[in-house]
Amino acid sequence: MGGLTMNTRVNPDFEKELQKYGKGNWNECFHCGNCTAICPLSEDGFLFPRNSIRTLQMGLEKKLETSIEPWLCYYCGDCSETCPRDANPGELMMALRRYLTTRYDWTGLSKKFYTSAVWEYAAIAIIALLVIVSFLVFLPLRPDAALMVNESGGVMINSLVAGVSPDRFVTLIEYGDWLMAVIVGGLLITNIFNMYYKTIIADKTVKIPLSAYFKEFWQLIYNFVTQASFSKCEKRSYWLGHLLLMTGYTIMFIIVVVFLPYFQIEEVVPVWHWQRLLGYYATFGILFFLGIVIFQRLRKNPITMKFSHASDWIFIIMLALTTLTGIILHIFRLAGMVEATYYTYIIHLAVLVPMIVIEVPFSKWSHLAYRPFAIYFSKLKLATLKEKSVRKLAPAIS
């Protein structure tokens, strides 16, 4: 049994459970090591995908929970393209990332969403319905809304609601943003702490020196902003598209949640204004990447798009609808179409809110946070390995 101990628990049904998280030819792999050899991100101490596949084949569920290797994979597809057994190790790593997301989530909702599309559809529908009903009941269109057009012909969006002043309306929406940010942020942060516990604290083979936490912290920020590890993959065009998507969505999220009073204003600012330039960049980045991904997933080519989990399509559809309703809202507002602006605004929020509430802490978008933290944690573990090596060399040198 190799490195197994008396305390190691084997789950014989582990492979069957993982089938819920993606397409996997688990038993096709005979550990030739080709996938690890060809991966530009695999390094001493983190020999993936082979190590992770071996762990799951043996049913070592708890050991896999301590692993951060699936997050170090950016699924460039080289390993799957060159696999002599067509085991598709890249897709296996993707399935493991979905599984690990459910292990970090203390609420259990992530598991429900990943293993049952009905659960995710129902959650999206309920949240969207709550948004729509809240507007129609508490923030209805004012009777004289047709007059709410400024001198430039644009709709004064903050003045459309009956009985609520423009400043008060923006404040209400801003409070809603903050509440959503606190809930979503709280869920994601606690899940990351759970990830830290499982991968660092629960892993008794490592003892991180305190200095390493400060010394390697820049890795977290750097990799979140640049997705630098992704750029090491041979397909750099995919890294660029992913970077556009990530920066576009992040910019839009920050503008809407943090700087809403400066973004949602009555005045229609010039095209060169920072507000519109950032909005156009975010829109372009998201649509550019989504267009490529949708086309490739429909063609099932390249190999990274050959298999699509239900969560992949839900994420793509929700993000596309959020962006498209935002574009339509912008067009209606510029055209002075008052009622169309009001109802499109409601529809836009009815898509945006469940998109953030569900996708960010529980589903696909959480990967945006887990990956840079995984890289940070990997550097911490490597610091332990280096310290052990130094201790071994010390007696020989002396």
Image: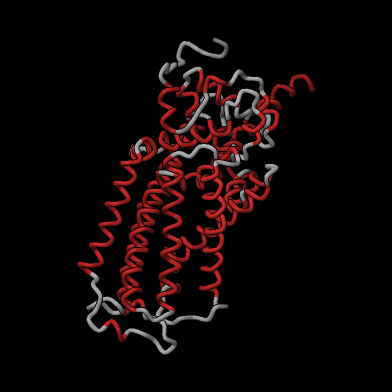
Residue sitting nearer the eye, 78 or 360: 78
Residue sitting nearer the eye, 86 or 387: 86
Q: Does the image show residue 14? A: yes
Residue 312, x across and y down, in percent: 46, 44
| The residue positioned farthest toward the right in the image shown | 397
Q: Quadrant of the N terminus?
A: top right
Residue 195, x across and y down, in percent: 46, 37
Residue sitting nearer the eye, 226 or 28: 28
Q: Quadrant of the C terminus?
A: top right
Residue 178, x across and y down, in percent: 37, 61
Q: Is residue 135 above or below residue 383?
A: below
Q: Is residue 388 left or right of residue 349?
A: right
Q: Is residue 133 left or right of residue 194?
A: left
Q: Is residue 198 above or below residue 61?
A: below
Q: Is residue 95 left or right of residue 345?
A: right
**Residue at image location 66% in from the left, 20% down from the top:** 32
Residue 247, x across and y down, in percent: 56, 57
Q: Is residue 202 above or below residue 123?
A: above
**Residue at image location 62% in from the left, 19% down from the top:** 31
Residue sitting nearer the eye, 97 or 395: 97
**Residue at image location 58% in from the left, 51% down from the top:** 242
Q: Does the image show residue 68? A: no
